[in-house]
Image (spheres, rainbow, N blue to C red):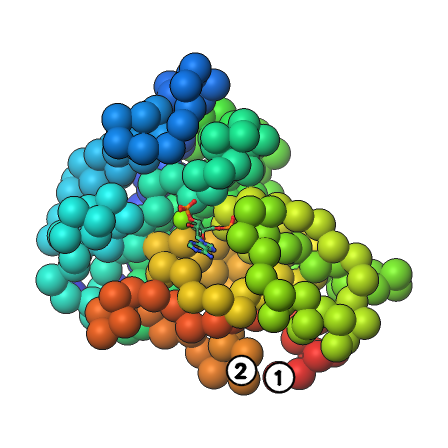
Amino acid sequence: MRRDFADPALLDALASLASRAGARIMGHYGCEAMVKGDGSPVTAADHDAEEEILAGLAQLLPGVPVLAEESAAAGRWPASTEVFVAVDPMDGTREFLSQNGEFTVNIGIIVAGHPVVGVVQAPALDRLWIGSPLGAEAMALGSGASVGAARDRRAIHTRALPETGPVALVSRSHPDAASEGYYAARGITSRRAVGSSLKYTLIAEGEADVSVRFASISEWDIAAAHAVLAAAGGTMTQPDGAPLVYGRADRQFRTEHFIACSGAFAARHPL
Ligand SMILES: Nc1ncnc2c1ncn2[C@@H]1O[C@H](COP(=O)(O)O)[C@@H](OP(=O)(O)O)[C@H]1O
Ligand SMILES: [Mg+2]
């Protein structure tokens, strides 16, 4: 099946689905004994959100294979990868545990290796982002609410470089030394620590300029936010400028290292 997925009704339905998944997560937020491990609220939050998303996708995109974090952990991988949905039901586990709000629901549609649609919802922040061939949008949306109830819905775009220099977003919980080396080599001194795929939606809406990762993570961690960033005028590529290609079953769906940045940053610092 080949579709371009530039369908406003589908995008809105995916946004409402992500919001419902966010509500399932929030049902476990702030529970006592939020420790990681089997049977813990973290596992239950992941599981509930993924269950919600898989049920919704079966209705909205019947027959489209899904790569989802919990399913993959249980050995269920997509049967084919020409068109598939990449799902991280809760990205930012450590942030969920520390209750700082920096965790997200992620639903991305991949076609021929490229993320063409992405929906990212931040349940504790009541924010949602959509990226597609129709453009990129941000909105305020309470968890569990239908997208029809969104407030401040607006198109977003990456920003011009600030006169004071680019702002780099670094992982709050998994910093890597090579990324620091990248920033240092370019004289980038402004840093903000952010958990989860929020790093890339913040660049998409013009709150920051660059975030690099010289480590491999899973495709579901970044596919949806990659689609948002690309639709907003940013890029997410390998460090040498080669595209990040998704659907790499041969790598167990682990990513290459990458540079995510605004269009203006890419023009100033060509790869
Ligand atoms: N060094 C590392 N080892 C394992 N997973 C890592 C990692 N660095 C990042 N990740 C994964 O990348 C995701 C986002 O992390 P970050 O906040 O650092 O950007 C997390 O997903 P989950 O929270 O869904 O497990 C985390 O598991
Ligand atoms: Mg993740």
Q: Residues within 10 Å of mark 2 (few under 14, many from 20)?
A: some
Q: From the image, which quarter does the C terminus lie in?
A: bottom right
Q: Earlier in the sequence, mark 2 or mark 1?
A: 2
- Check the image and name the residue furthest to the right: 163
Residue lying farthest top? Answer: 32
Give amino acid for label 1: Leu
Please name the amino acid that badge 2 sits on: Gly
Residue at image coords 27%, 71%: 251
Assess mark 2: CB under 8 A from ligand 1?
no
Viewer-closest of 202 and 48: 48
Q: Say whether marks 2 and 1 touch (CB < 8 Å).
A: yes
Residue 222 % position (x, y): 43, 57
**Which residue is located at x 80 percent, y 62 percent?**
189
Q: Where is the N terminus found, in terms of image quarters?
A: bottom left
| Residue at screen point 16% across, 57% down | 77
- In the rendered structure, find residue 271 and report the number of the disc placed on it: 1
Q: Position of residue 126 (x, y in %)?
A: 53, 29
Nearest the camera: 197 or 133? 197
Disc number at residue 241? 2
Mark linked to residue 104: none
Left or right, 111 with respect to 149, comes to left
Residue at screen point 26% across, 26% down: 39
Q: Is residue 81 above or below residue 195?
A: below
Whether residue 230 is visible here, answered yes or no, is: yes
Report helix, strand or loop for mark 1.
Answer: loop
The image position of residue 210, as x and y in percent, is 66, 63
The reply to whether residue 248 is visible in this rendering is no
Q: CA distance from mark 2 to mark 1?
A: 5 Å
Circle 1 Cα neighbour tier, 10 Å, few/some/many (<14 / 14–19 / ≥20): few
Q: Nearer the viewer, residue 215 or 142?
A: 215
57 lies above or below 238? above
Q: Is residue 210 above or below residue 67?
A: below
